[in-house]
Image (cartoon, grey):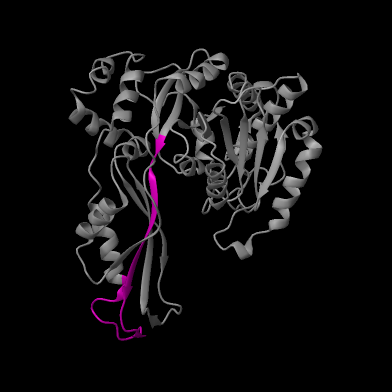
Amino acid sequence: MSRNDVSETDWAAFDRFADALPELYPALHAALERERHGHSLLYRWRGRGDGDPTVLMAHYDVVPATEEGWTHPPFAAELTGEGEQRLLWGRGAIDDKGAVVAILEAVEALVRKGFQPADDVYLSFGHDEETVGSGARGIAAVLRERGVRPALVLDEGGAVVERIFPGVSAPIAVVGVSEKGITSVRLTVEQHGGHASTPPRMTATVRLARAITRLNARPFPARLTETNLRMVETLGAHATGPLRAVFTRARRLQPVLRWVFGRLSDETRAIVRTTTAVTQLRGSLAANALPETAEAVVNTRIAVGSSVAETLGHLRRAIRDDAVRIEAVDASEPSPVSPSEGPQWERLAAAIGAVHPRAVVTPYVMLGASDSRHFTGICDAVYRFTPFELSADERGALHARDERIRVATWLRGISVYQALLRTS
């Protein structure tokens, strides 16, 4: 499990995982070169030629979990059910050990068959994606120093989903061509403390609460980026009913679409704007003492086309109180937009189509953040797609209780990775 306080992390568990891989995947480890960068792993599969390589990414750390409320213990990896309904339960089944092991299985099987890629393939497995991403950042820096410039990078992200877009009944493979920036913004109010029996009219916590409610009452403006429009146009061509006419005229009907996206769901609302969520609060250390410092952490996801500076400006205008200190922590700008056409996009789309022939492949902006953002400086075609079919319930279990994956889905994911590797 990744923890923000690295002193609380059980690094021995990470070492046991890395040490077990050569035994579990002997053919892969005989054919590929492996390096350890801290607790992150980098493999190189040498190709027959010297063209630009492909990088497959995933991370093997997971967010913390306790057994409370889980149908099956989060770290027991229990199997239930039969056939298409057979399930593997556990933290990381989807995010993101499922992808790590699917990549390893795909490479192991191809090596055993005597396959060698046309050009080099790298496997990059980060150890702290859920916290700061230092492992992936370090690996990207090493590749840059070695002059490696990948043709394509594929990391976790979108999936094969159904019934997320009105009027479209076909499965949809949503491939992230960019991702929002992520910044933790700390709001701090400091003032003289004292006994809680004689509070002033405006305590530090009241001032902080007012700042939070003002921020919540003034959401960021909705915008449709070029990626948003292309996604709507792509999916609109497969829609039925009256919405088809709207979606296929996306560029002319942007005000209508902004209104629709802002009201369909929390997910569609997040697609078209920068979002803020207050995730942590801190006040007094005692129940009967006025806090000298009141603090809130606002998790901010910055829309493509915006910036950290623009976001902080909006927060200051919304809060309208100079006594509230606003500062960005671990700021990360939105990622550059990778092409949704051309040879690398077609490679990925063909690999998805080989296993999911009915799926409509569309670009989108990933709402979360991934390790792939560290590779955008060395590659122009960075994509975020986890090749699993995920239901709404399964997606809802990410970072939550009862995370699980259907075994049949996971096996098809291996096939997608193999199809992509055969064109490497």
Residue located at (58% from left, 39% from top): 58
- Which image quadrant for residue 102? top right
From this view, report whether residue 66 is shown above or below residue 6.
above
- Tell me if I can see residue 398 in this picture: yes
State the quadrant of the C terminus: top right
Does 398 sit left or right of 380 as displayed? right
- Nearest the camera: 172 or 147? 147
- Nearest the camera: 125 or 43? 43
From this view, report whether residue 277 is shown above or below residue 86.
below
Does 210 sit left or right of 153 as displayed? left
- Nearest the camera: 136 or 184? 136
Does 290 sit left or right of 256 as displayed? right
The region drawn magenta spans: 178-205
Residue located at (23% from left, 33% from top): 258
Residue 169 x/y as whole percent: 42, 17
- Which image quadrant for residue 260? top left
From this view, report whether residue 281 is shown above or below residue 92.
below
